[in-house]
Image (cartoon, rainbow, N blue to C red):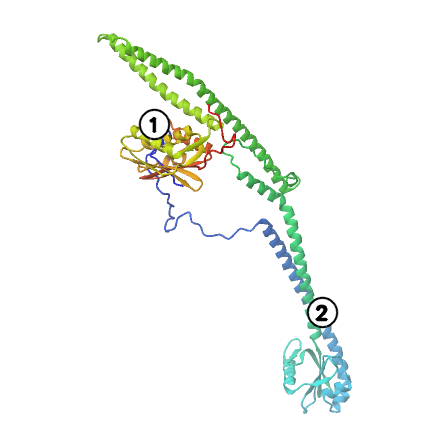
């Protein structure tokens, strides 16, 4: 859709300077617009923050509890293993005194005196080489080779708790005893059971923690979602209200937060109750505003209607008086002749001002009736013919402008009031003629755009004054703010055009820059439906 502008609007908004394309101000010291902002991460909802916080803190606590429990359990098991190892070492030092003195190896001793699985026995009797053996889970006894015995010896030389890891055998807690002052007996108990117990403990804690966290997350999400339901209802109500058109027409705000979500006994419920109270006040204010607007429209309509009669009388009597003066014989030059000329000039002035007031009153009455949905009589209108007639009428009134008409071979039909649509085209052309200098080319185009009829009025004048660009179609908008305007407009021409176009379900817009101004009217391109009663209004 093209917009078109004008140096001013017929009896609407005047324009003087062109609209410059808006440019972003640059931030000092940079080449980027000051309005540019660094991209920000998407904000989290309150529900997500609460769930993540609760689950995160709870999971951290449960992990700490699991680690502490496992550490304490491991310490207890290690202490139990150490106690068992001391008693076993004392016992084995007595049981092995005779076999060691007889020169038996560790394997032979374990075979003669079977022990539980994971039992390690090592014997060293100088100058003989040390021997060591371990009881397997199936009860068999396996002797350690020299490398494994060396790993055992290295572990015995270390400081701290005597825990030895032997490749291919496992990890043992070991303790040694001296026998006969020469032989050394080393006893070891496997730590596999302790490690397995701790692993089972950690696995159990991990599974319980994961299951508990899932249950906690579900319960927390449900609880928070239920708790924030009133707040979501408040937000949804506010969004629905924000989408209503509250700036014009009859408005009633029926949206409210449901009563169950506005319980004043809860914190969030009080927010919903406060919003409902606020909406009640706003609805009452809008209702009062609408009543005032209706009263004002009725007053304007009544006042305009009442003023038409006295204005017509003033105009009629002034015309009658001028006619009588014209028919009366002219007196000889002197005071009587001067008085006659003064009277005639006064009557002409009265007639001109009555015509001006009549035009203003008629425009105000038309706007009031359009606001009330009256004044339109629908029929099938040829928009092409309206443009041709309007351009033909504009040429004699604006001979110092160049008028160009661009229409197709096929008529563009719309359903509307022919006289009022003719007034729209006339106002746009008068606006172009009044607010552009002599020599300006005004081009009128009528075309179809799908199911829409488009009428454009383009001129190559100076453009719309940026100071009034936003209020161009408002009532009494004009570019010349002084009371001694030369355009003769009342500032109602474009507002009337917009009111008529809106009443026909169309739109009007303007696009202006120096040397290129376009007013565009878009209407549904369809003839009047022959079905009875459709779209017929009453003219008054």
Decide: few, some or many residues near mark 2? Use Cα within 10 Å; few <14, some 14-19, many ≥20. Answer: few
Q: Is residue 515 left or right of residue 364?
A: left
Mark 2 or mark 1, which has the lower sequence index? Answer: 2
Name the element at disc 2: helix
Q: Position of residue 15 (x, y in %)?
A: 34, 34
Circle 2 sits on which residue?
76
Report the number of numbered marks. 2
Q: Residue at x 32, y 25 (%)?
A: 484
Report, in whole angstroms, how far the alpha carbon at label 2 lies from the one at label 1.
99 Å
Q: Is residue 498 visible?
A: no
Is 417 rendered above or below residue 304? below
Residue 420 appears in the picture as rendered: yes
Give the percent coordinates (x, y) of residue 89: 74, 80
On the image, the x and y values in percent for residue 449 come to 42, 41
* Spot occupied by residue 92 in the image (x, y as percentages of width and height): 76, 82
Picture disc at residue 482: 1
Task: Say the numbered circle drawn on residue 231.
Answer: none
Crowding around mark 1 (Cα neighbors within 10 Å: few <14, some 14 to 19, many 20+) is: few
* Residue 57 vs residue 123, the one in the foreground: 57
Quadrant in which the N terminus appears? top left
Q: Secondary structure at mark 1?
A: loop
Q: Nearer the viewer, residue 525 or 293?
A: 525
């Amino acid at each position: 859709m093209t917009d078109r502008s004008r140096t001013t609007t017929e009896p609407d908004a005047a324009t003087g300077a062109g609209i410059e394309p808006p440019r972003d101000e640059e931030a000092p010291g940079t080449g980027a617009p000051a309005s540019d902002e660094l991209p920000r991460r998407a904000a989290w909802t309150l529900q997500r923050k609460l769930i993540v916080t609760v689950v995160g803190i709870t999971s951290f606590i449960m992990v700490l509890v699991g680690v502490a429990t496992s550490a304490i359990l491991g310490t207890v098991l290690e202490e139990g293993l150490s106690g068992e190892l001391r008693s076993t070492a004392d016992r084995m030092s007595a049981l092995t005194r005779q076999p060691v003195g007889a020169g038996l190896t560790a394997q032979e001793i374990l075979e003669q005196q079977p022990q539980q699985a994971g039992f390690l026995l090592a014997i060293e009797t100088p100058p003989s080489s040390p021997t060591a053996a371990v009881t397997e889970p199936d009860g068999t006894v396996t002797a350690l080779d020299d490398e494994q015995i060396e790993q055992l010896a290295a572990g015995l030389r270390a400081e701290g708790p005597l825990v030895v890891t032997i490749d291919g055998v496992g990890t043992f807690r070991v303790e040694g005893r001296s026998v006969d002052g020469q032989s050394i007996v080393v006893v070891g108990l496997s730590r596999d059971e302790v490690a397995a117990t701790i692993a089972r403990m950690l696995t159990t804690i991990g599974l319980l923690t994961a299951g508990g966290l899932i249950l906690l997350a579900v319960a927390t999400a449900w609880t928070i979602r239920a708790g924030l339901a009133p707040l979501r209802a408040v937000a949804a109500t506010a969004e629905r209200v924000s989408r209503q058109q509250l700036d014009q027409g009859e408005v009633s705000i029926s949206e409210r937060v449901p009563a169950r979500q506005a319980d004043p006994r809860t914190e969030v419920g009080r927010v919903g109750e406060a919003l409902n109270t606020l909406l009640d006040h706003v609805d009452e204010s809008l209702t009062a505003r609408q009543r005032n607007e209706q009263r004002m429209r009725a007053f304007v309509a009544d006042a305009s209607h009442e003023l038409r009669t006295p204005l017509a009388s003033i105009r009629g009597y002034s015309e009658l008086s001028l006619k009588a003066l014209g028919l009366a014989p002219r007196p000889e030059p002197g005071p009587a002749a001067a008085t006659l000329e003064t009277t005639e000039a006064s009557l002409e002035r009265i007639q001109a001002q009555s015509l001006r007031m009549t035009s203003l009153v008629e425009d105000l009455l038309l706007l009031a009736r359009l606001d009330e949905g009256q004044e339109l009589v629908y029929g099938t209108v040829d928009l092409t013919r309206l443009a041709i007639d309007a351009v033909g009428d504009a040429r004699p009134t604006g001979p110092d402008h160049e008028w160009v008409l661009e229409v197709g071979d096929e008529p563009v039909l719309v359903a509307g009031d022919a006289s009022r649509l003719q007034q729209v085209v006339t106002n746009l052309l008068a606006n172009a003629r009044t607010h552009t200098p002599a020599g300006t080319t005004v081009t009128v185009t009528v075309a179809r755009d799908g199911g829409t009829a488009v009428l454009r009025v383009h001129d190559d004048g100076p453009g719309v004054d940026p100071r009034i660009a936003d209020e161009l179609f408002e009532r009494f908008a004009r570019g010349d703010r002084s009371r001694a305007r030369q355009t003769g407009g009342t500032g109602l021409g474009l507002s009337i055009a917009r009111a008529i176009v809106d009443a026909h379900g169309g739109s009007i817009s303007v696009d202006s820059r120096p040397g290129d101004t376009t007013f565009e009217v878009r209407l549904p391109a369809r003839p009047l439906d022959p079905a009875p009663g459709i779209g017929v209004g009453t003219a008054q």
